Image (tube, grey):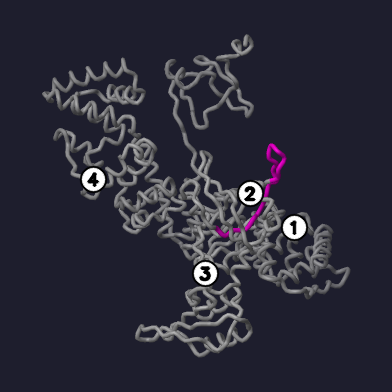
Amino acid sequence: MAVALRLEGLSRHASTHAAGVVISPRPLTDVVPLYKSNKDEITTQYDMNALERVGLLKMDFLGLTTLTVLHDAARMVERNRGVKMDTDNLTLDDPETYKLFARGDTTAIFQFESHGMRDILRRYQPTRIEDLTALNALYRPGPIQGGMVDDFINRKHGKTQVAYELPQLKDILEETYGVILYQEQVMQIANRLASFSLGEADILRRAMGKKKKEEMAAQRAKFMAGCAANKIPEKKAEKIFNLMEEFAGYGFNKSHSCAYALLAYRTAYLKTHYPVEFMAALLTSEAGNTDKVVKYINEARGMSISILPPDVNESDLYFTPVGEAIRFGLAAIKNVGENTAKAIRDSRLAQGEFKSLYDFCERIESRFLNKRVFESLIKSGALDSLGPREALLASVDEALVTLQRASRMRESGQHGLFMAAAAPAPIPFQLQEAEPWSEEERLASEYAMLGFYVSGHPLAKYASRLADLKVVSLDQVEGQRNGKEITIAALIVSSRPMRSRKGARWAIFTIQDMTGIQELLAFPESFGRLEQMLKPGKPLLVKVRVQVEEAGTRLSLEDARLLQDIADRPANGELRVRLDLRKLSEEAMDRLTELMADSPGNCPVIFELCRPDGSLAVMRAQQRVNPSPELVAAIRQVCGGNAVASVSA
C-alpha cells in the first residue's frame, strides 16, 4: 500500500501526440522544457493545456492516405486517358456524383463507408456539398442517440416544418433546416443577437463544450445583457441560449466537417467518372492490408472492373490500370520485392516486351533472380504471357542455367550471348511439357504468392447455389444483430490453435469469401466435432452465431458442411435451366446438348423456355445429368449468367 501511494499520480511514460505541432515566436528552448523521444522526435514536456497557458500555439496537422489516393488517381487518369485533372478545383455540382451518394454506393469513399452512414445517405438523398458537410457532423453517437438524424432527414424532405425563433436566425440556420448543428453557428448567434465579438463568441463556444457551471452562468448573464441591449425579448433570448447550450454537446466544427465532405466528394467524383484509375490508386494505398485489399477487389469486380494477375509484360510495381481492368503489381508477389520488380519493368520499358522465358533470362541480371523468385513469378501468373505455368515451372532449372550464362557474359564485357566471338551462340531452350494444372491448383498457387485470389475465386463456381441457400456474405456481417444465427460460405485461410483453462482444444480461424475476411471462433464442442472438416482451402457452408463486441463483430461456429457435397444436390430433385429463345442460337443448343451428354446422372432437367412474345413454356428434357458446379458454370457460359434458375437442395 505504501509503495502504491508513492507511485500514484506519477507519469507512467512519455507519450507523443500523433499530429500536434507547437508554434512559437522564439526558440522553444527559451519557453518550454523539451524532450527527445525514442524516435529522435523533439517534443515538449508540457501537455496541450499547459502549452496554451504559457502562450504557445498548438496545431494538429493530419496526414491522410486519401490525399495520396487522389493524387495517384489523377496521375493515372492523365497518363491513361490524356485528361489533366486538378482535384483541388473540381466542380461541386456534378449530379452523377450525388447519385452515387444517394444510392449509398460509398465503399472506398472517405468517411462515408460504414453501413450506418450508407443507410442515412439512402434516406437523406444528398444533392449538394452542404448536405455532405451536415451528414459528417451528424453521424456521431450524440446526434444519432438524440434523434437528431431522423429529425434532420424529416426537415430536409419537408415532413417536419422548419421554424426560426427569431427572423435574425434564418440566415444562420437555414442551411441546416433550423437546427443548431455547428459550433460556428453558436458563435454567429452570439455575435448577431448579443453583439459578442468573434473572440468572445469563441470563449462562449468553448465554455458550452466544457459544461463548467460557473463559467456558463457568467456567459449566460453576458448573453442576456447583450440581447437586452439589442431589444431581443427576454424569454426568446433565454430559450435561444438554452437551445445553444443543448446543441453545444452535439455541436461539431463546421470547417473540419466541410474539409472532410470535400475530400469525400472528390473521391466519389473519381469513383463515378474514372473508376478504374480510382480503384487502382486505392488498392495501391492499401497494398499491405489484406482485409482492405480483399474488400476493394470485390468492390472493383462489382463495378465490372476485372482484376488481372501480375504480368511481366504489363505490370508496374503496384496496381495499374490496363484499359478497363486493373493489373496486379510485380512488387506485391511474395519473394520478389521492389528491386526485382523495378529491374523487370525497366528492361521492358527500355527493350520492349519479353518474347519468351529464354529472352527474359537473357535480359534480367542474375542478382535479381533465383529459383525461389522464378517459381514465385510463375505461380503468381506473372509469366503467363511467356507460356503455361506448368511448363514454365518444369523449365526453371534450364532458365537458371541461361540466366547465369548471360550474367557471366555481361560481366566479361560481352554484352549479349549473340555478340560473343569466342563461342557460338547457345540455342534457346524449349519449354518442357508438363501435366496441365486444374483450376483449383492455379488459384491456390496465385493465393500462395499474392495473398489473394485474383483471376478467380474457389467460391465463384458455387455462386448460384449460394444465392439459392441465401447465405450472408462476410461484408454484410457487420450489420447483423448480436446472437443471430446466419449461414455463410467461406474458405479457411489460417488458424490459431488455442487451449481453454481446462485444457480443452479450440481454435480461432481466419475465413474468407469473395467479399472480405472475418474471424471465426470454434469453441471446444464444435471444434472437436468438426475438426477434420476445418482444413485450409476447402469451400465450406458454415452455420455461425453473430457476436457483436466492442472490438468488432466476430462469428462463433455452430455447424459446417463441405460446399461441394451440397452443391451436387439438385433443386427439389431437378435442374432448372431458363432459355431465352430470342437470343439462343443453333450453335448454343448443340453445345448445350453436348454438355448434358458429357454429364450423365440421375437428375432430371427442366427447361423454362422464354418465347419471343414474353410467355413462358416448361419442357422436361429426356437426358438426365449430374448437376455439378462445372456443368452449371458451362451452361451459364453458353446460355447466359441467369440461365440456371436453381440448383438448391
Quarter assignment of residue 601: bottom right
Instruction: Decide: few, some or many residues near mark 3? Use Cα within 10 Å; few <14, some 14-19, many ≥20.
Output: many
Front position among marks 1 and 3:
3
Give the Cα separation between the discs numbered 1 and 3. 38 Å
Q: Is residue 481 above or below residue 570?
A: above
Q: Amino acid at mark 1?
A: Val
Q: Nearer the viewer, residue 74 or 626?
A: 626
Q: Is residue 292 above or below residue 3?
A: below
Q: Residue furthest right?
A: 422
Tell me the magenta residue range: 488-505
Instruction: Decide: few, some or many residues near mark 4? Use Cα within 10 Å; few <14, some 14-19, many ≥20.
Output: some
Q: Residue at x 79, y 69 (%)?
A: 394
Question: Which residue is the site of mark 1?
Answer: 373
Question: Which residue is the site of mark 2?
Answer: 522
Would you say 137 lies left or right of 372 here? left
Question: Which residue is the site of mark 3?
Answer: 464
Front position among marks 4 and 3:
3
Quarter assignment of residue 412: bottom right
Front position among marks 4 and 2:
2
**Which secondary structure lies at badge 4?**
helix
Q: Residue at x 18, y 27 (%)?
A: 193
Instruction: Decide: few, some or many residues near mark 1? Use Cα within 10 Å; few <14, some 14-19, many ≥20.
Output: some
Question: Which residue is the site of mark 4?
Answer: 155
Would you say 134 lies left or right of 230 here? right
Which of pointers 1 and 4 lies earlier in the amino acid sequence? 4
